[in-house]
Amino acid sequence: NAGVTQTPKFQVLKTGQSMTLQCAQDMNHEYMSWYRQDPGMGLRLIHYSVGAGITDQGEVPNGYNVSRSTTEDFPLRLLSAAPSQTSVYFCASSSPAEGRASPLHFGNGTRLTVT
Amino acid sequence: GNSVTQMEGPVTLSEEAFLTINCTYTATGYPSLFWYVQYPGEGLQLLLKATKADDKGSNKGFEATYRKETTSFHLEKGSVQVSDSAVYFCALTRDTGRRALTFGSGTRLQVQP
């Protein structure tokens, strides 16, 4: 069972560079989201999508773009990387089966360092 | 807005000791409450959940009871094992549409043999 797959696992960028973090899920989940994890701050929501073609901002969206052209994929784009974006990024998905109690299924994360 | 407060770690215990990790929350209405666990190098996994007041979530020997009167959802386990060493996150959600979670800052548990 693949579940939620994130690539790459590690990435180092220079300030100003752009890149795309990939996320794919094979569970046919409608809901997908991106979180960033920083020490002492838990996880914070960046962007989310409730279905193909529909995206919206979370708590900390600045500097990031997303799109959802298929149910399976939800890439996160860093437009011009900044050192403040050094973090661990997690993609998550869930189904609507249990409403708001539906568990999130997380990928293993991408550790990004911006120098 | 919504918020979750967890006790700071790390928590270091000997094997077979009793574990409590405190979690309190602030939210209007009736949120759903969760505990997630993160093992080294992995993403978060759902450990247990509770969706209404006085519900008890349980899994793998861990338990937590949704206490609306004290706005708490403390995690407990009667006898921890080395394999329980991980980071534990308390979280809540109220928003059905976004299905977004508000997380606590996490508590690292280290269990020594």
Image (spheres, rainbow, N blue to C red):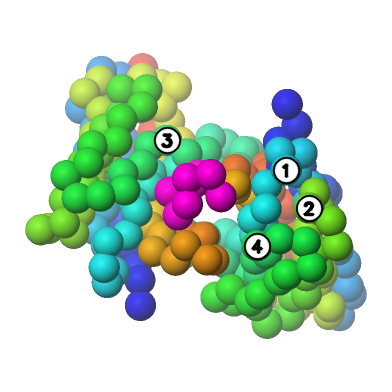
Q: Is residue B71 visible?
A: yes
Relative to residue A41, is residue A27 depicted above or below? above
Kindly state the secondary structure of the residue where label 4 is placed: strand
Q: Residue at x 73, y 52 (%)?
A: A110
Q: Which residue is disc 4 drawn over?
A: A50
Residue B66 vertical placement versus B42 (above, below): below
**Number of the label disc, if any, that sits on residue A28:** 1
Q: Earlier in the sequence, mark 1 or mark 4?
A: 1
Where is the N terminus of chain A found, in terms of image quarters? top right
Disc 3 and disc 2 on one polypeptide chain? no
Eye-nearest disc, 3 or 4:
4
- Mark 1 vs mark 2: which is more N-terminal? 1
Disc assigned to residue B47: 3
The location of residue A6, given as percent across then percent down, is 77, 47
The disc placed on residue A71 is: 2
How far is mark 1 from mark 4, CA to CA?
12 Å
